Image (cartoon, rainbow, N blue to C red):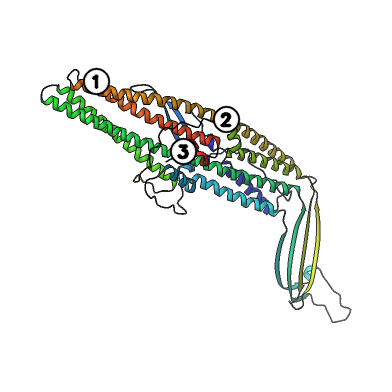
């Protein structure tokens, strides 16, 4: 059973939306081309992969010497793998608990940090869009010293006095102009809809931050569970190595008094070497999992730290499936972000339609002008301008067509996300049921294989059989221990996925997962 990385599709769309807002703002600053006030065009799709992804994958392992189990793995991609250390995170004091790891991840994980900066950009673009509706006041001082050639301007004077001519060069003379200028848009429906669209984009990006926080909880919590499971595998590997060493010493002693053949000693030694190789591999995986965890939460990338207590098996919340679906519809931040993106696209479409309406702008200035400041006299002007677009070469039709396409795409993505959320929750419930069932099987199998190992060792001690049965029983016991560890890990990871699937994972995590 594979859950595609759909958890991240909506928090990343804030990046492309912010880019579109930047383009619109730049066009507005440059005069807006033909129309004066440009339409705010949103991207055709909000689905990008720039923010990263967190996905849970469950695959059944084939039956061999162990019970066939469902193994869970977590894939973290993009920015959620890393972290930022600004401001510097506090040093780790004592063992790292799950609660502390999640708190550090929410503070320093790069995925949530990047989306937070996109929100700041969107707020800035909202301010830019609002500026088109507010008064613009500037002041300037102009100083001029000028000498004018009247003849070059075509000005000619005929003097009625013989021998006297008018000068053709006038000046130099000075002019100083101190002036304040005001510009106010009185009516522009396109600018109003642009602002409303940018405000909806801010709302969508803020919801994307909440969704990114849920993804951080999923990523960091899953990484912590992986470390705990890896530590349990190392402990199980050490126990199996101790058992193999004990069997090897016992076989050597029995070989010394002629009770067993040399082949039994060699078989026991091979088992010791096999367990040593397995333990080395498990220890290496444990160290790398610890390093991966530190990368997500802002700590130095090292495995030289301790992990808190194990997270044992605990029953999952017994909320009905319909209740979980209702909570997801009310709480999922990515669903709210998708709804806000749809509203932003609808506002952009309205802006495209209203681009055909007239706009009214009033400009005024007041200042003093004169040859020198003491000689300056007050002057003013008030200008009202009504702009009526008649023909713009089909630009409005093209922008309406693009905006309509964006609305249809966003609505389709919202519908798809709603279906995906329901599918995720149904899959998580199946995972919980399967993991809980396999825990009971794995626990019983672990007990049976341990009992079988004890009995075969007793038979070997009594000289009834050789150590072939003991080696086989030891392998079965080792596989059963790993099966139980994997089952508990899969169940805990499924509960973590359920917390993410219903929304507000950081707040509800303690309800789903027993945290130390």
Can you identify the residue that label 1 sits on?
469
Assign a secondary structure to mark 1.
helix
Question: On screen, 109 above or below 363?
Answer: above
Contact, mark 2 vs mark 1 (Cβ under 8 Å)? no
With respect to residue 232, does 207 lie above or below? below
Residue located at (71% from left, 41% from top): 349
Q: Which mark is residue 422?
A: 2
Q: Residues within 10 Å of mark 1 (few under 14, many from 20)?
A: some
Q: Which mark is residue 76?
A: 3
Is residue 168 found left or right of 41 in the rendered image?
right
Mark 3 and mark 1 lie on one chain; the one further toward the N terminus is 3
Secondary structure under badge 2? Answer: helix
Q: Residue furthest left?
A: 257
**Residue 116 % position (x, y):** 55, 48
Give me the C-alpha separation between circle 3 and circle 1. 43 Å
Side of 384 relative to 326 (left or right): right
Q: Earlier in the sequence, mark 2 or mark 1?
A: 2
The residue closer to the viewer here, 462 or 92, is 462
Binning the other alpha carbons within 10 Å of mark 2 as few (below 14), some (14 to 19) or many (20 upward) gives many
Q: Position of residue 117 (x, y in %)?
A: 55, 49
């Amino acid at each position: 059973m594979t859950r595609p990385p759909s958890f991240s599709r909506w928090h990343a769309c804030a990046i492309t939306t912010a880019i579109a807002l930047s383009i619109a703002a730049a066009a507005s600053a440059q005069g807006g081309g033909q129309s004066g006030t440009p339409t705010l065009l949103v991207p055709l799709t909000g689905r990008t992969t720039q923010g990263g992804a967190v996905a849970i994958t469950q695959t059944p392992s084939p039956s061999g010497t162990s019970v066939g189990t469902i193994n869970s793995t977590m894939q973290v991609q993009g920015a959620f793998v890393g972290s930022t250390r600004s401001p510097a995170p506090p040093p780790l004091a004592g063992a790292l608990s799950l609660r502390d790891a999640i708190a550090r991840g929410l503070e320093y994980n790069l995925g949530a940090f990047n989306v937070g900066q996109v929100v700041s950009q969107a707020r800035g673009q909202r301010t830019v869009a609002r500026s088109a509706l507010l008064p613009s006041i500037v002041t300037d001082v102009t100083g001029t010293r000028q000498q004018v050639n009247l003849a070059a301007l075509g000005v000619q004077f005929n003097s009625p006095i013989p021998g006297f001519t008018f000068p053709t060069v006038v000046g130099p003379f000075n002019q100083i102009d101190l002036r304040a200028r005001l510009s106010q848009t009185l009516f522009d429906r396109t600018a109003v809809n642009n602002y409303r669209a940018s405000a909806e984009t801010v709302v969508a990006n803020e919801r994307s931050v909440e969704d990114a926080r849920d993804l951080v909880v999923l990523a960091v919590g899953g990484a912590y569970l992986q470390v705990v499971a890896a530590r349990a595998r190392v402990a199980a590997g050490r126990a199996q190595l101790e058992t193999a060493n004990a069997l090897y010493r016992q076989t050597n002693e029995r070989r010394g008094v002629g009770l067993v053949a040399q082949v039994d000693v060699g078989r026991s030694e091979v088992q010791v070497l096999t367990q040593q190789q397995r333990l080395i591999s498990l220890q290496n995986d444990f160290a790398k999992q610890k390093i991966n965890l530190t990368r997500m939460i802002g700590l130095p990338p090292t495995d030289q730290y301790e992990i808190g207590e194990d997270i044992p098996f605990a029953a999952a919340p017994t909320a009905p499936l319909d209740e979980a679906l209702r909570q997801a519809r009310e709480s999922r931040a990515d669903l709210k972000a998708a709804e806000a993106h749809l509203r932003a696209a609808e506002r952009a479409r309205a802006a495209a339609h209203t681009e055909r309406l007239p706009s009214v702008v009033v400009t005024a200035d007041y200042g003093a002008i004169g040859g020198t400041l003491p000689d300056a006299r007050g002057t003013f002007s008030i200008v009202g301008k009504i702009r009526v677009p008649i023909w713009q070469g089909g630009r409005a039709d093209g922008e309406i067509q693009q905006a309509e396409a964006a609305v249809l795409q966003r609505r389709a993505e919202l519908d798809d996300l709603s279906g995906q959320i329901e599918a995720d929750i149904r899959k998580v419930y199946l995972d919980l049921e399967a993991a809980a069932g396999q825990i009971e099987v794995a626990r019983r199998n672990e007990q049976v294989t341990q009992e079988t190992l004890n009995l075969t060792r007793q038979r070997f001690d009594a000289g009834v059989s050789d150590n072939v049965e003991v080696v086989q029983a030891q392998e079965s016991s080792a596989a059963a221990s790993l099966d139980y560890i994997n089952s508990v890990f899969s169940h805990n990871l499924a509960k973590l996925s359920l917390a993410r699937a219903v929304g507000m994972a950081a707040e509800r995590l303690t309800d789903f997962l027993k945290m130390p």
